[in-house]
Amino acid sequence: MADASASVGSKVGTAVLQVLPVKKIELDPDNPRIRKFLESYGANPNFDHFALALGAAGDDDGDTSTTVEKLKSSILSIGGIIQPIMVNKRGDGKFVCVEGNTRLFLYKTFLDEKRAGNWASIPALVYEHGMSDLQMDAIRLQVHLVGTRAWDPYSKAKYLHSLHVEKQMPMSMLTEYCGGRQKEVTEFINAFTDMEKYYRPIVSDSAFDPSRFSGFVELQKPGVKESLLESKHNLTEFSTWIHEQKLFPLNTVRLLPRILRNPKATEIFLKQGARKAAEVLERPGVSKALSDANIGQLAAALSQAIYDLSWHEARKIKKDPGGEVAQSLHEVLDALEDLLQIGEAG
């Protein structure tokens, strides 16, 4: 087997890449990420307790947007894991998972459920001579507090575009593999397409700024492109506004439908940008009762208001995606999806 030097340095030593029997590796009850959930189950938590704790804490693979269920779907789709877990071989000969408890737990679950596939063994970087608590903490700190830097959104979108458009990977498969939401994956691919087609031609190679990508993601939101067409603008103009920073910060792209429907706001926008234009847009007043309500009460009130909508009112909102009500609802939907995604990941 190949040797792999520990990235935290000589204090930890050398790990050996092995394929270990899943049944021989113990889940780590002292893992700081799940310990607070396990403490309520006493000194010897069982497998079901680990299941509850890992589900409550979310995924441990360095991506806070990934839940256990998404990781499960991805592993089943690929047929295994790409990144080995890290295992400490203690002085008494026992193997304990230091990093990758969620992946190990899923393998154990698949094996117990007799899922199709090879779940009896798992790739592992094994520290043969046993690590001290300090050394295990060093690995956890590096993996979970420093960690591997995530791809920037533009690079991620470029790769997704290549897989889906150039290599013809079906969207369902692509979504399963990356563990994301299909809506988000689709927005990224379409945003990359628009940025390459309309933004790249108007700037030099040296001026091409991948950090403007989020503006093109906002462009995919319902009603934004429609508002450009209705006001007789096009995507080349939109790209020019991005380049000239008239749409800054980039989340002001979502204000375009309201800005372009307001002649005064449009005039200010074309001269001074979206931030100034937003100052003349009317904002609905918020009563003291709404201001004092907590988020749960507001959510309940919004749900009830939606249920109470007449067919005519609902149809009117759907037929006008660039309208103020529809835009406000889409903003709420985006905010809720982001909030619940963070909540799922713990």
Image: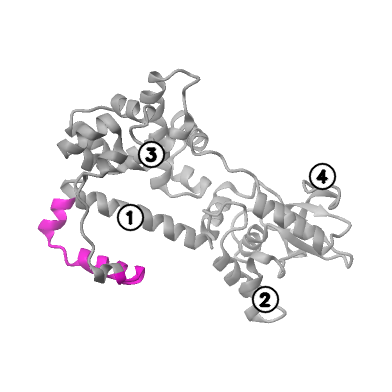
Instruction: Return the disc, 4 or 1, that comes first in the chain's sequence.
Output: 4
Q: Nearer the viewer, mark 2 or mark 4?
A: 4
At x 49% / y 32%, what residue is drawn?
Answer: 158
Q: What's the CA distance linking mark 4 and mark 1?
A: 45 Å
Q: Could you classify mark 3 by the number of other residues whose Cα lies within 10 Å: few (under 14), some (14-19), or many (20 or more)?
A: many
Instruction: Return the disc, 2 or 3, that comes first in the chain's sequence.
Output: 2
Instruction: Return the disc, 1 or 3, that comes first in the chain's sequence.
Output: 3
Q: Nearer the viewer, residue 259 or 218?
A: 259
Left or right position of 194 against 259: right
Image height check: is 196 above or below 102?
A: above
Region in magenta:
292-317
Q: What's the CA distance linking mark 3 and mark 4?
A: 42 Å
Residue that numbered label 3 is attached to: 250
Residue that numbered label 2 is attached to: 46
Q: Nearer the viewer, mark 4 or mark 1?
A: 1
Q: What's the CA distance linking mark 1 and mark 3?
A: 18 Å
Residue that numbered label 4 is attached to: 5
Instruction: Return the disc, 2 or 4, that comes first in the chain's sequence.
Output: 4
**Amino acid marked by disc 4:** Ser
Quarter of the image where one finds residue 97: bottom right
Contact, mark 4 vs mark 1 (Cβ under 8 Å): no
The picture places residue 62, in percent across and down from the top left corner, at 61, 52
Contact, mark 1 vs mark 3 (Cβ under 8 Å): no
At x 65% / y 54%, what residue is drawn?
Answer: 145
Q: Is residue 270 something that shows in the picture? A: yes
For label 1, the SS is helix
Q: What's the CA distance linking mark 2 and mark 3?
A: 48 Å
Residue that numbered label 1 is attached to: 333
